[in-house]
Image (cartoon, rainbow, N blue to C red):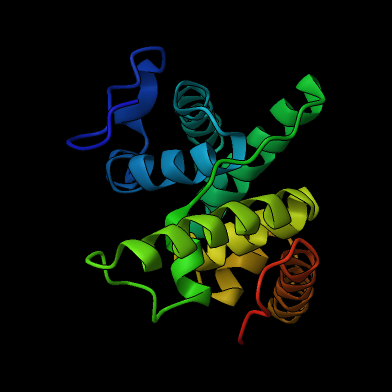
Amino acid sequence: MPRSGAAPALTSVPEAGEAPGFEVAYSTYFHPICAYLQRMIGNPDDAYDLGVASFEKALRNWAKAPPDHIAPWLYRIATNTCLDELRRRKLIRWQPFEKFAAVFHPGHVSHDNPERDAIRGEQRALLREALEQISPRHRAALLMRECQGLSCEEVGEALGISKEAAKQLLFRARQQLRTGYTALGGEPLDG
């Protein structure tokens, strides 16, 4: 999957130039959505394919896109595309994400301390394992909020729920993550 530069051309969708604003949205959100999908599905090639499929679906429905809420709308399409694929495979596997660990341990950012780095590696492994134990909906909400930086309102829109329901979902997801992390032997997480 290309990691930088312009988003690849949607060669299989010739009408992309006929949808006002689509090309800008595509070039702006393609890479962040592929990164999100990679964390959800665990494979960069699959994430790239799902990203392209998500944007093809978005283009087909571009007339229905909410002009002021494009990002949550695109994340919702990507989330649904990914969850459909995971259901089809009957395999749910999540990719590790180091940024998420920093949210819970902001003091552990130094890279000049081998002991601290080893502890951080162990904490990340426990965090990944705890994250695998929570539901896909909770994982998706956490990834969108903590890794992709979407607001609670945007997470709610992406998941088709209200802002208040998104806050509750994120609260429960964080609780489950903390409980799972602690049960696996990790130190209690703050926050």
User: Residue at 68% across / 78% down in the picture?
Assistant: 163
> What residue is drawn where x is 56% and y is 30%?
57
Q: Quadrant of the N terminus?
A: top left
Residue 103 lies, in percent from the top left, at 48, 73
Residue 14's place in the image compared with 73, above or below, is above
Residue 69 spot, x, y in % from top left: 49, 63
The residue furthest bottom is 191
Query: Residue 8 sits in which quadrant?
Result: top left
Q: In this view, does 22 lie to the left or right of 52?
A: left
The residue positioned 28% from the left and 68% from the top of the image is 113
Describe residue 73's horizontal placement relative to residue 25 as left or right.
Answer: right
User: Looking at the image, is 189 positioned above or below residue 176?
Assistant: below
Foreground residue among 113 and 62: 113
134 sits to left or right of 156 = right
Which residue is situated farthest in the top direction here?
12
Does residue 19 appear anywhere in the picture? Answer: yes
x then y, percent, for residue 11: 33, 14
Residue 188 x %, y %: 68, 80
